[in-house]
Amino acid sequence: MANLRQTLYAWRDAEAAKLGVELFRVLPNNALDEIVKALPRTKDELTAIKGIKEAKYREFGKVILAMVDEHAGASHQLSDTSRQSTRSDLKAVSPRSDLVLPDLVPLASEETTFSVSAYLDIVNRELYRIRARVVGEVTSIKFQGSAVYIGLKDAEDESALSVFMWEREYATAGIEVAAGMAVAVEGRSDVYKPTGRLSFRAETIELVGEGALKKAYDALKKKLDEEGVFAPEKKRPLSEYPERIGLITSKTGAVIHDFLNNLGKFGFKVRFTDARVEGAAAVKEILAAIKYFSEEEIDALVIIRGGGSLESLQAFNNERVVRAIAEFPRPTIVAIGHDKDVPLAQLVADHAPSTPTAATVLLNRSWDEGVHTMRYFIKDISALYQGELWANKERLGTLNDVVRAAFAEITMRFSVASREFSEALLLLGRWFTKRGEMLRREAGDLVGNFHRALLDAGREVGESSRLLQLHNPLRQLRLGYSILSKGGKVVRSAKDLPAGTHFEARLSDGTIEAQTITHPRSDQKYKVEP
């Protein structure tokens, strides 16, 4: 299963590269994994997998089924005979992608027959593993849509090679190719199935030869200079005390160690992005690193590499790289060793020291100056302090005598005040003692007088209570008397109760309502109806 999966992924990657599209537009990873699990043998089984519909089947179906058949050991139809494939028939032919292919059988064999499409698939899969760098002379160049077609020939025997390249990758190279130029292309070959034509699908292209490189260098330098890209007024100073540094170089080079070892111990925060600094592929990696740092919060961008020839420094004479440095939003430092011609990347940078070590001098400068200034101030402050110290020493001696005399005076006055205070406290204590004895005597008299007054008041209250009881109306009622009232008023005369008058009579144990029957006379009794 693992070999089939690797074969499918390698095929998918090759198709995507050939078509110039993203990998998922050929087939997504989950579709490839489902093929490995399901091992479809027919169209219906293959199109049942999610992500593979009729259109995908028409484009890739036969190739996929052929790879599954090869993996499963399916037989190829040979008249009435067949041959069963086994794992012994397979071998890994690509350490890079672990691509697994069947041992190729000579076409003259009576045991194996390939269709044209299947055979070309095998050829292309075999060719895909061979990545090469090819040098030749340009015979023609043609731009068609998003593609570039270049004709190359060998300078010795006139051998020809057709080169295909995407226009965006050609533009990234930053050179203008013309017939007669010597160039180097890097990529893979394949056979275009509709025409059966072999072509070299280049991913990078660069000039070859010191003369061509110098000519391209001078032309681009003149073009950019006329645009004002190198204008001195565009150079930006480094901020004082930079801390956050973006660093672009190769992690395998010696210059990164020189840079870090010579960077001052001032708390720099260096963010490093690894990028090739030589070869055609370096352009893409340097551009990607510059784009990354353009979106980061840094104080300066540093690009460094060791010395080299014009050919080895092509990436730093690339127009897109130069413009990316010119448009970088923060100050740039480019330190690149060179034989003769200054790389254009250095000319456009805000600061162009000759070596990576010199780049650290620029970054350290404001910090070193700050340290120097700090030391000067420390020394100056120390001298001022010593001067003031000696100048005040005598004043301090005089003040010491004054303070001693004042302290002695204060001590004497304090002694006098303390003695007077003690005497005052003694007198105050005696006064409080006398007053205490007086208060105790007066308190005793007060308590005695209060007790006698309380007894007298008790006797008077008792006598008053007796008199109240004696004259209490209720007592008279208990003796048989009653109190008559009419309309809430006490009746004091018989005249107030004519015949038929309603009135109340209060007795000792309650109240009754009554009515006079006859008109009362002063000389006779009258009846009362309850």
Image: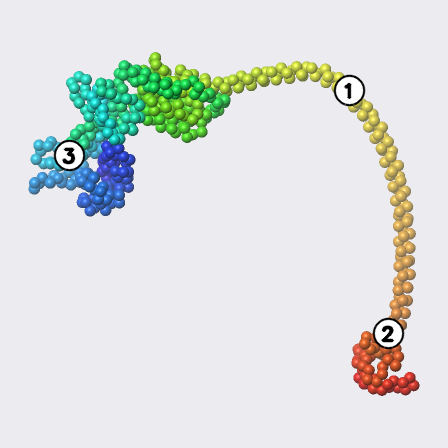
Front-most of residues 464 and 323: 323
The quadrant of the picture occupied by the C terminus is bottom right
Instruction: Tell me which numbered mark, 3 or 2, is placed earlier along the sequence.
Output: 3
Q: Are there few (<14), some (14-19), or many (20+) residues within 10 Å of tag 3?
A: few
Q: Where is residue 208 in the image (x, y as percent from the top left)?
A: 26, 18
**Residue type, label 3:** Tyr
Q: How far apart are marks 1 and 3 (CA)?
A: 115 Å
Q: What residue is rendered at 87% in x and 85% in y? A: 520
Residue 51 figure quarter: top left
| Residue 303 sits in quarter | top left
Query: Can residue 251 be seen?
Result: no
Q: Residue 119 carries which label?
A: 3
Q: Mark 1 points at which residue?
A: 402
Relative to 437, residue 131 above or below: above
Q: Position of residue 220 (x, y in %)?
A: 33, 19
Q: Which amino acid does label 1 sit on?
A: Val
Q: In this view, does 99 lie to the left or right of 429?
A: left
Picture disc at residue 515: none
Give yes or no for contact between labels 2 and 1 (Cβ–Cβ under 8 Å). Answer: no
Image point (83%, 86%), residue name: 517
Side (left or right) of 463 relative to 195: right
